[in-house]
Amino acid sequence: MTLVHKVKKIIEKEKLIEPGERVLVGLSGGIDSTVMLYLLFRISEDLSFDLGVAHINHLLRGEESERDEEFVRNLAESLSLACHVGRIDVKREAGEAGKSLQHAGRDARYGFFRETAAEQGYQKIAVAHTLDDQVETFVMRMLKGTGLRGLSAIPVKRDNIVRPLLTATRAQIEEYGRMYNVSFVHDSSNEKTVYERNFVRKRIIPLMEELNPAFREKVSFLLNDLIAVNRMFDARAHDFMKTRISWDDETASLGVEALKGLDEETRFRVMAHLLDQLEPGFIALREHMRQINNVLMGLGPNLAAELPHGFRVKKTYDRLTITKLNPQSPSMDILPVMEGSNRLDPFNITLMIESLRELGETPLVFLDPLTVLFDEDKLGMLKVRSFREGDRFVPLGMKALVKLKDFFISQKIPREKRRHIPLLLSDDHIIWVVGHRMDDRFKVTGDTLRKIRIHADPILSS
């Protein structure tokens, strides 16, 4: 089976892309994502879907990063595809959030992809994870001590993220690249074994293959078995959670005896799902479950434990609660803003507000995640504050009010970050969740007479 047929088969079998959908292709410029773009381009006519390209420049590798961005722009232009490029200082983001470069880069990348898809009307986001990535993730999670759920590694589809290359090996992708003379760029950081994934890829897996040359294939078979087992336990956990969990803002609560009555693996799934809801993307480990079980099964009526990442588990007689402790939120005071530069220290940003005298021909509303345009005649007094329970707005592209809390959940923004996101208001209406989405009611249209441009700049620490 050729690689084209392999990818087409998984798209159809797993319903990754439906006819008529628009697909945003995450394109780094490396061989995996470049081959994926060419494959989807070939398949798109048969399956009737449209493509666009998204690239994020992490600003980590100097001229090499600029080269990658230029390569992506040129490739998209050669295929007559829309190209959406974001530029984020990942090193600074990592330092401010206390994350590794890899973690911060991943968050920035997926955040930009989701934002662009929502703003530009793409229903699916295609990323180029391969079977090799799947095996590497399996090994990494096994070494960290993750449970059965975590070992199943990367899903072929989650929400609007799809992975058409997940059953293809890197060798097959490289062979396709040679056969069709596919040009791509090399990321020099992929050679550095100081990064965990690179160490696993270049040092550990080759040792495994010395013991068994079919190591990757064997792991692939095991992963297929794990997926089936995981679906069974996840179904049990889902049935339990439908009726047994109650929420009070940022605290989940459930009955002690009901939780004790579950088999150990289903109980682990329930707790893992709760932890993931409290901090999207969090992967529960067996060590976390051991600490939870100590509280759950302990003899005292009032027991508590502090878990990593700021989780607190507490048993009070017949109820168990799990809370994600939040760092100090920025001031809730309303901060007025006006035309010109507005330094907002509680949010660590400067807002630059500029009235545009020249309208231009295209009524653009979205320039990049930190720059938007508004119809100036629709605006009242401008001010900034943080999130409050009950906040609502009309996200760009929609017509009805949406709870801001639901929007944050849909964008997978962790609870502890929500009150740190500045909200720009016109009078009492939220017009921009800064860095994420503007309000549709205040957008520029063909009838707009005056535009106002607002740009957010992070305040660099001195």
Image (cartoon, rainbow, N blue to C red):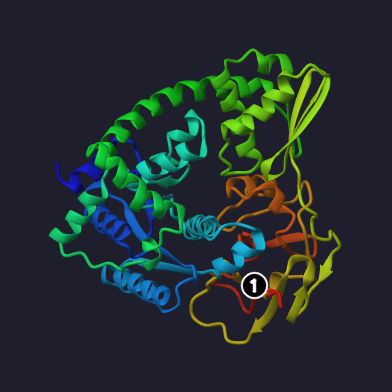
Residue at the spot x=45%, y=25% of the render?
A: 231
459 relative to 129, above or below: below
Quarter that holds the N terminus = top left
Disc 1 secondary structure class: strand
Q: Is residue 82 above or below residue 237?
A: below
Report the residue that reaches farthest toward the bottom.
357
Determine whether, in the image, residue 271 is placed left or right of residue 46. Answer: right
Instruction: Depth check: give the residue in front, 422 or 236.
Output: 236
Q: Amino acid at mark 1?
A: Asp
Q: Camera-side residue: 416 or 451?
A: 416
- Tell me which residue sits at (73%, 58%) in the image: 420
Which residue is most to the right? Answer: 333
Position in image of residue 401 (x %, y %): 67, 49
Q: Position of residue 19 (x, y in %)?
A: 32, 45
Left or right placement of residue 343 versus residue 130 in this view: right
| Residue 89 location (% of width, % of height) | 55, 70
Which residue occupies 56% across, 27% down? 269
In the image, is 443 to the left or to the right of 167?
A: right
Q: Which residue is mark 1?
A: 375
